[in-house]
Amino acid sequence: MISPALVLSVIVGLFHVSAYVFIRGRAGARLPLLIVAAILGAWAGDTVGARLAIDPLRVGEFNLLSASFVAWLAIGLVAIVAVLVPERAPGERREVISTVVHRAVPAAGEPAAASAGPEPEPGASQ
């Protein structure tokens, strides 16, 4: 059975991510990370609030104030990590890395012409 704390954490997390996107204007590709972080943060915040027993704003047994605070901490962590990780330029392609090993000496039974040199893989930039 799903606990009410998990359901309320999902609601609180989605609410705070929606508020973040409304304030920020856009979230881009990090939106799924924001949602997961806010939900887990709200769930952890409820647990911390239950342990500390100092939350003045509660919904039943759910500690709303501490859940909201930790959800915003998680959203801030994702935002900081997104700023620190460099983005690729729009026209930049990732370099293809090959892990194929070619023999320098032809194996027994192979013609000598096969050892003329390694052939590039299809799609590899030169």
Image (cartoon, rainbow, N blue to C red):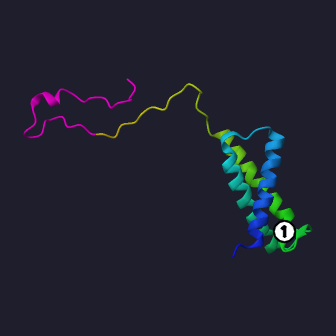
| 74 horizontally vs 54: left or right | left
| Residue 75 location (% of width, % of height) | 74, 50
| Residue 9 location (% of width, % of height) | 77, 63
| Residue 125 location (% of width, % of height) | 40, 26
Quick one: which residue is furthest to the bottom in this view? Answer: 1
Q: Quadrant of the C terminus?
A: top left
| 123 horizontally vs 3: left or right | left
Kindly identify the amino acid type of the residue bearing the numbered disc 1. Answer: Asn
Helix, strand or loop status at disc 1:
strand
* Residue depicted at 91% across the width and 66% down the height: 57
Q: Quadrant of the N terminus?
A: bottom right
| Residue 11 location (% of width, % of height) | 79, 60
Residue 30 seen in the figure:
yes
| Residue 62, quarter of the rendered image | bottom right
108 in the magenta segment: yes
Counting every numbered tag in the picture gives 1
* Residue depicted at 74% across the width and 55% down the height: 38
Magenta range: 101-126
The answer to whether residue 59 is above or below residue 29 is: below
Q: How crowded is the residue under tag 1: few (<14 C-alpha within 10 Å), some, or many (20+)?
A: many
Quick one: which residue is furthest to the right in this view? Answer: 56
90 in the magenta segment: no
Between 59 and 78, the residue placed more toward the observer is 59
Quick one: which residue is furthest to the left in this view? Answer: 109
Instruction: Please give the residue where the numbered disc 1 appears in the rendered image.
Output: 63
| Residue 97, quarter of the rendered image | top left
Between 16 and 44, the residue placed more toward the observer is 16
* Residue depicted at 42% across the width and 33% down the height: 96
Q: Main secondary structure of the magenta part?
A: loop
Between 101 and 19, the residue placed more toward the observer is 19
Residue 55 seen in the figure:
no
